[in-house]
Amino acid sequence: MAAEWYQRAQNQAVAKGLTGALLGAGLGYGLGRAWGGHNNAGWTATGAAAGAAGALGSVENHADTVFKNCMENRGYKLLW
């Protein structure tokens, strides 16, 4: 059961990471254009990195919660 949840979390991490990167890149590019900067690649890359990091952080928290619940249900007490 936990292995299935963990695999699902990994699959979601890939999908959400790509989606976050694409949305972040679009937002970064838009901000770069709006502010008239000539470094749109920098804005785009920063937006993509921020979007991917935010999405992956969300999924990683879910995977940690699944692992923690599994171990606690087996009698282990985790410190986080």
Image (spheres, rainbow, N blue to C red):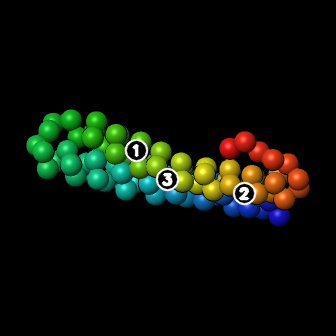
| Residue 27, x across and y down, in percent | 29, 53
Please give the residue where the numbered disc 3 appears in the rendered image.
Answer: 55
Residue 64 appears left or right of 43:
right
Q: Nearer the viewer, residue 59 or 25?
A: 59
Point out the frontmost of discs 3 and 2: 2
The residue carrying pointer 1 sits among few (fewer than 14), some (14 to 19) or many (20 or more) residues within 10 Å by Cα, namely some
Q: Amino acid at mark 1?
A: Ala
Residue position for label 2: 66
CA distance separating discs 3 and 1: 9 Å
Amino acid residing under circle 2: Val
Residue closest to the far right = 74
Q: Are marks 2 and 1 in contact (CB under 8 Å)?
A: no
What label does residue 50 carry, if any?
A: 1
For mark 1, give the secondary structure: helix
Furthest residue in direction left, as rendered: 36
Q: Residues within 10 Å of mark 3 (few under 14, many from 20)?
A: many
Secondary structure of the residue carrying numbered label 2: helix
Q: Amino acid at mark 3?
A: Ala
- Residue 67, given in percent of the width and then of the height, sits at 75, 52
Q: Earlier in the sequence, mark 2 or mark 1?
A: 1
Pointers 3 and 2 in contact (CB under 8 A)? no
Q: Quadrant of residue 2?
A: bottom right
